[in-house]
Image (spheres, coloured by chain):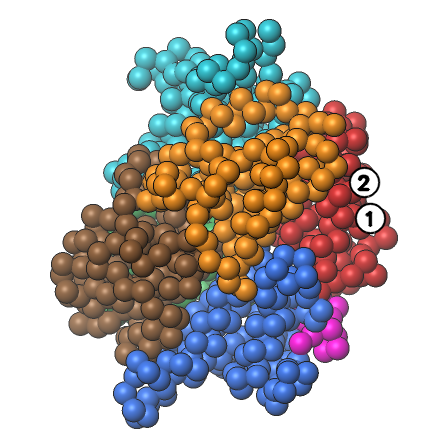
Chain colours: A blue, B red, C orange, D brown, E green, F cyan
């Protein structure tokens, strides 16, 4: 009976490569991981956006309209809908002159209750220390 | 020469672009290059926009990333794929991708 | 009306650079231009038959089929790049040619404009 | 002796990041460790059957076969990533599994070390 | 934490790396990251090497790119794949790739 | 009866992506392009290394030994063997503190007679102006 924590740290811009998309889809896959594990064991993902990666969190991404692909916005909302822990680095958001209002902070429109957290980098550093395994995307 | 440059990157390629010289230079921001048109860091616009050139940004790529024409620096003109075809055939003779 | 040769050299399936190439070709053909389209390296897989549509990947097969139907669009995949990836002739999507790299160079000979889309 | 889980997420065929992953796995297995190896996105094609050896591409099939033979190496490819590229079950190289992404997460549960190789 | 970082890039990723802090930090230069160990620009070594960390460089990747141990900055220790396995299991608990 | 000039400008580091490799293999393919063209017509490639791209030109690349792949060194030598015009930007070579002696300047060991040229950037700019089509890798 154990829970292993796994951090998905996203530092890449969206769309050029699949990095941020893969981070979210793999984090979401934690929902079905139990079929491979012993009774009571589990994997708990934490998703953090840092550096240029915070630009994945902008609202109104129209990737489906123009390119027929799920937007990172949709993936973020799915993550929140499934109650994943999502953290966004405040220093980087500030650096880009963005406000909370520009960012995907919840998935209320699809019935989600969990909110993303805008946190100082030091909080994300803490996550990195706490988790069992770290992955940078 | 009349040179059209597709700039598809935000963090790389500026060194190469800065050295290019052309009688007529057009820079078309596409893909992650669009952040040059939309995104300030510590209150400053991308230094790329200080280059003497005609700047364009592909609307489809803007909107895919959560921006609209309203977010675009005044030095940059939003264009569609159809406009880009005309730029290629009518305004520039050589075109490169960075 | 002119001829545009587009080379997608190392653009990835899953990036939007390949999409850019195909959409630019589409816009050019719509305006009456002729387009030659060359894919090599990791862009090779664009020409693979039987790609399943997923919402996380752009699915360009339909656009390509429409482009071939116009008669103004030729697309060719690098033979060696395909073989190296274990993707053989039988698996090539209808409409595509398979040639060596000199085909691309020859296409630029008569092109009014050439756009090589490189990058990661 | 420990267990290392390596994920190659978007490493390209033709880059050396994939090679790095395979060579690291090889070195770890040689020292008696156990390795789980997961490929998704553009790394998917590493598991395709029938890749032809060219001098311009590293050819990892032989090393993989040797690794499978040790009994200390498991390799699995992301099913959806493969299907999206038009590469189906019959085309999978011997030894490889095809699973969904939760397999990778489950593998990290019992891993002593996890290395995700991302990048372009 | 004891953190091992594989640095695979020459032009990107330093911003992320600079912010990392760890009780014990190891930086293993691989792929195009090896240029940090070998290549000066305008006479200056890569600023990456000023970080307080243990530096390693993968010999295979050095040699593939035309360098040898003799070209490596004295702060960096050349290692083989076999050494890297030991670093991973013996010296660092968490390992990341940049 | 015409010759079209085609520039292959290499600005990328070797091995991480295939960019520089593809530039050289495609430039070399000019040797067989005539089969697709009218009698007397031809394509003339020029290969230029600028920026980080000059690091493709270092001697003693052991990519075959370690990774079983043809090195960029070998591709450069093949290009020179086939008498392709190859130019390397002097300012960038200087910036990296390299000397001509570090660089692949000829293919004499495989019987080639053509040499690479170490030139100021202004010469490469001239090539860009002269050629019919430009390609950046």
Left/right of residue F64 with respect to residue A133 in the rendered view: left
User: In the rendered image, which residue does mark 2 sit on?
Assistant: B54
Residue in the picture at 54% in, 75% down: A48
Between the residue at mark 2 and the residue at mark 1, the CA separation in whole angstroms equals 8 Å
Residue nearer the viewer, D34 or D78: D78
User: In the rendered image, which residue does mark 1 sit on?
Assistant: B77
Q: Does the magenta stretch include residue D111?
A: no
Left/right of residue B94 with respect to residue F33 in the rendered view: right
The residue lying furthest to the front in this view is: C69
Residue in the picture at 72% in, 40% down: C30
Q: Position of residue B79 (x, y in %)?
A: 78, 48
User: Looking at the picture, does residue F1 appear above or below residue D53?
Assistant: above
Q: Residue E21, can we see it?
A: no
Q: Position of residue D23 (x, y in %)?
A: 26, 53
Q: Where is residue F30 in the image (x, y as percent from the top left)?
A: 48, 20
User: Looking at the picture, does residue E1 appear above or below residue D10?
Assistant: below
Residue nearer the viewer, F75 or F61: F75
Label 1 resides on the chain identified as B
Q: Foreground mark, 2 or 1?
A: 1
User: Looking at the picture, does residue F7 appear above or below residue B64?
Assistant: above
The stretch of residues the image draws in magenta is: A91-104
Element type at marker 2?
strand
State which quadrant residue B82 falls in. top right
**Disc 2 + disc 1, Cβ < 8 Å:** yes
Left/right of residue B20 with respect to residue D18 in the rendered view: right
Label 2 resides on the chain identified as B
Residue in the picture at 30% in, 44% down: D51
């Amino acid at each position: 009976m154990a829970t292993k924590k796994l951090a998905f740290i996203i530092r890449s811009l969206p769309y050029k490569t699949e990095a941020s998309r893969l981070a979210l889809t793999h984090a979401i896959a934690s929902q079905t991981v139990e079929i491979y594990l012993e009774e009571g064991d589990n994997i708990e993902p934490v998703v953090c956006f840092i550096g240029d990666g915070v630009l994945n969190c902008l609202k109104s991404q129209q990737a489906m309209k123009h390119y027929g692909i799920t937007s990172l916005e949709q993936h973020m909302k799915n993550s929140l809908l499934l109650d994943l822990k999502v953290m966004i680095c405040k220093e980087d958001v500030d650096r880009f002159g963005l406000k909370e209002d520009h960012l995907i902070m919840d998935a209320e429109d699809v019935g989600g209750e969990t909110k993303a957290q805008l946190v100082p980098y030091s909080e994300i550093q803490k996550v990195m220390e706490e988790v069992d395994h770290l992955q940078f995307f | 020469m009349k040179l059209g440059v597709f700039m598809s990157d935000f963090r790389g390629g500026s060194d190469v672009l800065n050295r290019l010289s052309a009688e007529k230079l057009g820079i078309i921001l596409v893909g992650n290059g669009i952040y040059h048109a939309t995104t300030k860091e510590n209150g400053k616009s991308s230094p790329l926009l200080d280059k003497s050139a005609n700047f364009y940004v592909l609307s489809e790529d803007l909107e895919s990333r959560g921006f609209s024409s309203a977010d675009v620096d005044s030095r940059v003109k939003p264009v569609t794929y159809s406009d880009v075809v005309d730029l290629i055939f009518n305004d520039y003779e050589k075109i490169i991708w960075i | 009306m002119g001829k545009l040769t587009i080379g997608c050299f190392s653009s990835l399936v899953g990036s939007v650079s390949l999409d850019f190439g195909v959409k630019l070709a589409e816009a050019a053909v719509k305006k009456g231009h002729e387009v030659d389209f060359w894919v090599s390296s990791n862009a090779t897989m664009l020409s693979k038959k039987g790609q399943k549509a997923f919402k996380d990947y752009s699915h360009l097969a339909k656009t390509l089929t429409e482009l071939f139907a116009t008669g103004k669009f030729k697309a060719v995949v690098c033979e060696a790049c395909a073989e190296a990836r274990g993707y053989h002739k039988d698996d090539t999507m209808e409409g595509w040619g398979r040639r060596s790299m000199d085909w691309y160079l020859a296409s630029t000979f008569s092109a009014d404009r050439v756009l090589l889309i490189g990058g990661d």
